[in-house]
Image: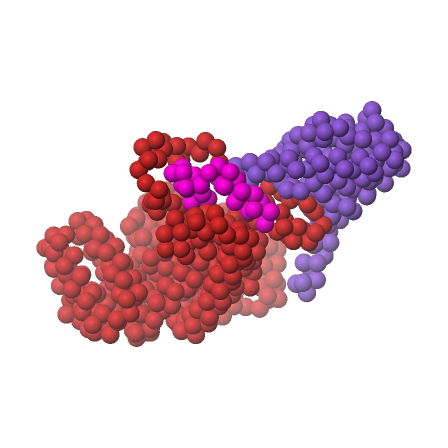
Chain colours: A red, B purple
Amino acid sequence: MIPGDAGYAASDNQSLTSSNDINPSRLNKHQYTLSLLNEAQRIGLLSHQEVYSIQYKLMVILQDLIRRYTQGKSSSVATDTAESILTSILYAVDADLLNFEHPNQAITYLKTSDVVKLYERGVERVSQCLEEVKSLYKEVKQHKLDVPVAAYNTTIDESLPLFIKKYNILFEAHNTMASIDYPLAMDNMRLQGVFYMKHYLERLQLENEFCSRFNPKALIHIMESFGRLHRFDYRIELFNIFELCLHNSLFSILSGGDADQVQISAHQFERLERMLSQSDARGIEKMIHTSLKRLQYALQIHDPQTVDYMNQCSRELIGRILNAAKHDNLQSVIITDRPEKIKPVVMSIHTSNRMSDVRLRQLLDEVIRSETKEEKIRLIKSNFSSLHDYLDLLESDCLYGDEYEALYASFGDVELAILSKIVFYEELRGGDTELRTIVFQKKRAEFDWQVHLIEFMKRLSPSRVHTIEQLIDSICYEDIKFN
Amino acid sequence: MLLSRFLNSMSIATQMPYVTELLSLNERTMAYNLQLTPRDIQDLMTARTQVLYSYGRVELGIEATKELIEVFSTSPYICQENYLSTLNELHEIFYYLKNETEDKIGDFKLIAMMKEYFDDECAGSLKLLRNNLEEFAENFRIQTMRQEYLKEGDDES
């Protein structure tokens, strides 16, 4: 079809005479029609003239759609727009041609039938798929898990309805046009448009259904432990709930617990660590495989799609266990109960009880008008207590230069730990690096107060930074409201 | 990209049938002593393809070309000697303007406006026409932005 297409030129002579059957492995499922035409011409199933004729008919469809796109007001469009509309046409044609059992049947159909009808049938298939997406979405929304995970909630409550509302079958059928933040355990990102959305929703539904078999409180508990392990706020992170749930339920079975349990005690962890670190790859594979069967049996999971999905996800788990066992780091794969540490007795920075905007403005004015830094610090310390108010104060540019440092010097370790947790959030994620190293490595910060905090922290003694680091670990992210 | 090559090869290949269609316009333009030979039409279409390519646009029909010919053939400033070169220049100005006004003005309206400028303020000068329309496009964009801004404000309130 397109002269000199290098992608298929290399082995032309070898395969020309071998067969008139199209080899499906040479076709690209995501640009099916184009690759089908290329391959059919290469093996002589379609003549150059026949390919041209099919392309011409596609161009007539494009011409018509351009007119409809511009509402008859313009006969030309930007190349990007034309390409997008053509991609949309081919998306619909692909939707129909992919239904033929063998590519040769699709070619016969292309040769003998009306391309416009083929396209219209494709549009109908896309439209049907959109209807399926709508009803799948209702199911997902109805069985949504009650978890405070922002990406999960935003995806279900905002992104998916937006997709359904905005999806354009004629001009942008290939476009997924929604920011789906919540990651699936196993995704197929090569799919596009409404077919991707159907795939996404089917898997999300399956994941939800699995997770809903477990105690909701226990689920949240392992997410909290997961966040504490990696020193991040699980509510704002991108991770898959099903994966956590599946893995921990497998570990529960493996360590003598129940199938519907996801919490792993320290005692269970010790047992798992002994078992897994003493086994080779085949042994671990066998253990996970057996646990998976037991889990499916105990939870009465017989649906082939769910069983297959669980099997696929567990294969990935085996690789992660092997790697973690090799590096003596199984605690990164097995999420154990990490009880909330004892909170410090006195916290002068509270996470709630904000003052009113009017009061805040008055105080900020007073701070600005104060002549000495001692006076400013006194005013702040006697009036500010909420973390939000402190952040508003710090970001309001009321303080200059060494005034920041004077304020930090007046803080105890707890206050410094809370502010450090905000400033070094990204660096603390993962939990492998010491705070002192993080402080010295941090070069940039968004706000002035953060730059001064970094400088202040650099001057603290190593033992004080260590104390602050321990406090950071004892502060619950769940208690700090960032918004 | 496979798709853009496909698009280019097809838009060039589909130009052939247009020669007859454009030749038939001579019947009307003859009233103004203007006509295009098959060779002129081929040159015109080649120049148009280049302009479309350079402005990053795709046109699968020739409606705009036909409209430019029909509308501008009545201008007192176009004669047989400058007919082809003027048409080429008008195509360039037209597609330039389509991009600059972000496709917000329909073909016929835009061509009618070009003709009005050409015959009145520009007195047949293509250079003046280009200058005037550049200024028009700039004002149009500012006005559109302002309207969109106000609309956003309305939506929010």
Tell me residue A267's x, y (percent).
15, 67
Left or right of B140? Residue A120 is: left
Which of the pair A11/A316 is nearer the observer?
A: A11
Q: Residue at x 56, y 60 (%)?
A: A166
Which of the pair B55/B100 is nearer the observer?
A: B55
Quadrant for residue B129, please give it: top right
Q: Residue at x 23, y 56 (%)?
A: A315
Tell me residue B21's x, y (percent).
72, 39
Q: Is residue A109 magenta?
A: no
User: Can residue A170 be spotted in the picture?
Assistant: yes
Which of the pair A197/A417 is nearer the observer?
A: A197
| Residue A55 higher or lower than A151, as above or below | above
User: Can residue A451 be spotted in the picture?
Assistant: no
Q: Residue at x 43, y 48 (%)?
A: A107
> How many discs appear?
0
Q: Residue at x 51, y 38 (%)?
A: A49
Which of the pair A54/A324 is nearer the observer?
A: A54
Quadrant for residue A476, please give it: bottom left
Q: Which residues are magenta?
A: A34-61
Left or right of B132? Residue A390 is: left
Q: Main secondary structure of the magenta part?
A: helix
Tell me residue A232's x, y (percent).
36, 58
Q: Residue furthest left?
A: A278
Q: Is residue A40 magenta?
A: yes
| Residue A220 higher or lower than A169, as above or below | below
Left or right of A337? Residue B8 is: right
Tell me residue A388's x, y (percent).
50, 63
